[in-house]
Image (spheres, rainbow, N blue to C red):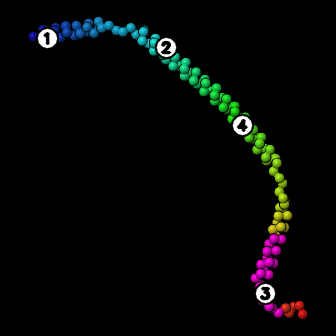
Amino acid sequence: MRSITLSLLATLLLTCALAQAEEETIPPAAAPSTEAQALQERLAQSEQLRNEEAAGNAAQLQRLRQENQRLRLQLKESQAQTQPALLSEEQTWFALGAGLSLISVLLGALLRGSRKTRREWIN
């Protein structure tokens, strides 16, 4: 019984292997060529877009550089036109001291008021 089962099993395996070997395959040459052509077209389109963007970026970069240079020149001109200080440092301190003295005299006169005091020192 075992020999029949083994021979039947061997026959079945061989027929399955032969049946699988006889399958027709689709020719692979047709599909990849159209795929490759489609990929090449997509590559060409992406390269064209990238080149257009690079040209646009280069033009924008050139325009921004010119504007930057113009603004730097304008800044230098405005810095060169600054007017000198109205007063020197010594004059500023002198004016500050004079103003403080004047305010002190006025404040002293206002705080003294109109009281009548004896002015003995005038005698």
The crowd level at tag 2 (other Cα within 10 Å; few <14, some 14-19, many 20+) is few
Mark whose residue sits in front, 3 or 2? 3
**In the rendered structure, which segment of residues is drawn in magenta?**
98-118
Q: Can you say whether 66 is above or below 50 in the image?
A: below
Task: Tell me the kind of residue under disc 4.
Answer: Glu
Give the residue number, with chain letter if any, for mark 4.
Answer: 67
Which dot marks residue 114? 3
**Quadrant where the image shows the N terminus:** top left
Q: Residue at x 74, y 37 (%)?
A: 69
The secondary structure type at the circle numbered 3 is loop
Disc 1 from disc 2: Cα separation: 55 Å
| Label 4 close to label 2 by CB (< 8 Å) | no
Chain-order first, disc 3 or disc 2: 2
Q: Residue at x 69, y 31 (%)?
A: 62
Chain-order first, disc 1 or disc 3: 1
Give the residue number, with chain letter if any, for mark 2.
Answer: 37
Residue 19 placed where, x, y %? 25, 8
Residue 85 placed where, x, y %? 83, 57
**Quadrant where the image shows the C terminus:** bottom right
Q: Residue at x 38, y 8 (%)?
A: 27
Residue 90 placed where, x, y %? 85, 63
The crowd level at tag 3 (other Cα within 10 Å; few <14, some 14-19, many 20+) is few
In the rendered view, does 113 fall on the left or right side of 43? right
The secondary structure type at the circle numbered 1 is helix
| Label 1 close to label 2 by CB (< 8 Å) | no
Which dot marks residue 92? none
Mark whose residue sits in front, 1 or 4? 4
The secondary structure type at the circle numbered 2 is helix
Chain-order first, disc 4 or disc 3: 4
Mark whose residue sits in front, 1 or 3? 3
Give the residue number, with chain letter if any, for mark 1.
Answer: 5
